[in-house]
Image (cartoon, rainbow, N blue to C red):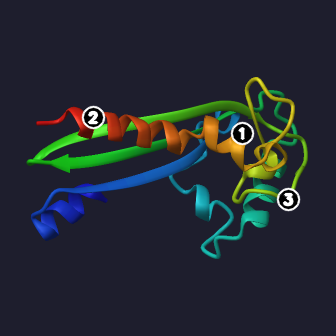
């Protein structure tokens, strides 16, 4: 995305992509996380399909990964944030969005949807990537 925008606009740009990567599914849904169950982008359909695809899988390890690409002064920089965890057996909780009701981050017993915004935002993959970007920009000359 950033390369495309940079080429079209001939300006400094950045873009972000976030995905859920499940080990037993060879990293799927990955870059198509939002459209995993089809083009309608329905979170419940996505979660239902993921849970069905993991039904017989003992390995439920997963991670949320965010990558920010910054093109600045015609140089490309990448900033990554990851939250490791596992996929729950069923949906739990009403807070958050996307796959939050089925993702349990390492070190916690509850899904993102049950942990609440404060905890989720504190350990967020997006926060990690954005913090790295901000730190880089504060030192860039």
Residue placed furthest toward the bottom? 40
- Rendered residue at 63%/44% (across/down): 121
**Quarter where residue 79 is shown:** top left
Q: How many marks?
A: 3
Kindly indicate whether the residue at mark 3 contacts the one at mark 1 (C-beta within 8 angstroms): no
Q: Marks 2 and 1, how far apart in space?
A: 25 Å
The residue at which mark 3 appears reads as 94
Q: Is residue 101 visible?
A: yes
Residue density around tag 2, few if under 14, some if 14–19, many if 20 or more, within 10 Å? few
Compared to residue 124, the image places residue 6 above or below, namely below
* Camera-nearest label, 1 or 3: 1
- Rendered residue at 34%/41% (across/down): 134
Q: Which mark is residue 69?
A: none
Please name whichever residue, 70 or 4, is drawn nearer the observer in this view of the structure.
70
Q: Quadrant of the C terminus?
A: top left
**Quarter where residue 24 is shown:** top right
Q: Marks 3 and 2, how far apart in space?
A: 35 Å
Compared to residue 36, the image places residue 79 above or below, namely above
89 with respect to 2 (left or right)? right
Q: Which mark is residue 136?
A: 2
Dot 1: element: helix
x, y (%) of residue 88?
Answer: 85, 40
x, y (%) of residue 77?
Answer: 24, 39
- Rendered residue at 59%/55% (across/down): 33
Kindly indicate whether the residue at mark 1 contacts the one at mark 2 (C-beta within 8 angstroms): no
Compared to residue 38, the image places residue 71 above or below, namely above
Compared to residue 11, the image places residue 60 above or below, namely above
Residue density around tag 3, few if under 14, some if 14–19, many if 20 or more, within 10 Å? few
């Amino acid at each position: 995305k950033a390369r495309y925008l940079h080429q079209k606009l001939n300006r400094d740009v950045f873009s972000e992509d976030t995905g859920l990567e499940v080990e037993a599914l060879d990293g799927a849904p990955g870059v198509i996380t939002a459209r995993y169950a089809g083009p309608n982008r329905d979170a419940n359909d996505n979660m239902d399909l993921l849970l069905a695809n993991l039904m017989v899988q003992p390995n439920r390890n997963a991670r949320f990964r965010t990558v920010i690409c910054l093109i600045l002064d015609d140089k490309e920089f990448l900033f990554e944030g990851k939250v490791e965890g596992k996929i729950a057996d069923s949906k739990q909780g009403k807070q958050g969005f996307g796959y939050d009701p089925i993702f349990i981050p390492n070190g916690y017993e509850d899904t993102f949807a049950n942990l609440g915004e404060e905890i989720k935002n504190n350990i967020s993959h997006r926060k990690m990537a954005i913090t790295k970007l901000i730190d880089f920009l504060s030192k860039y000359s």
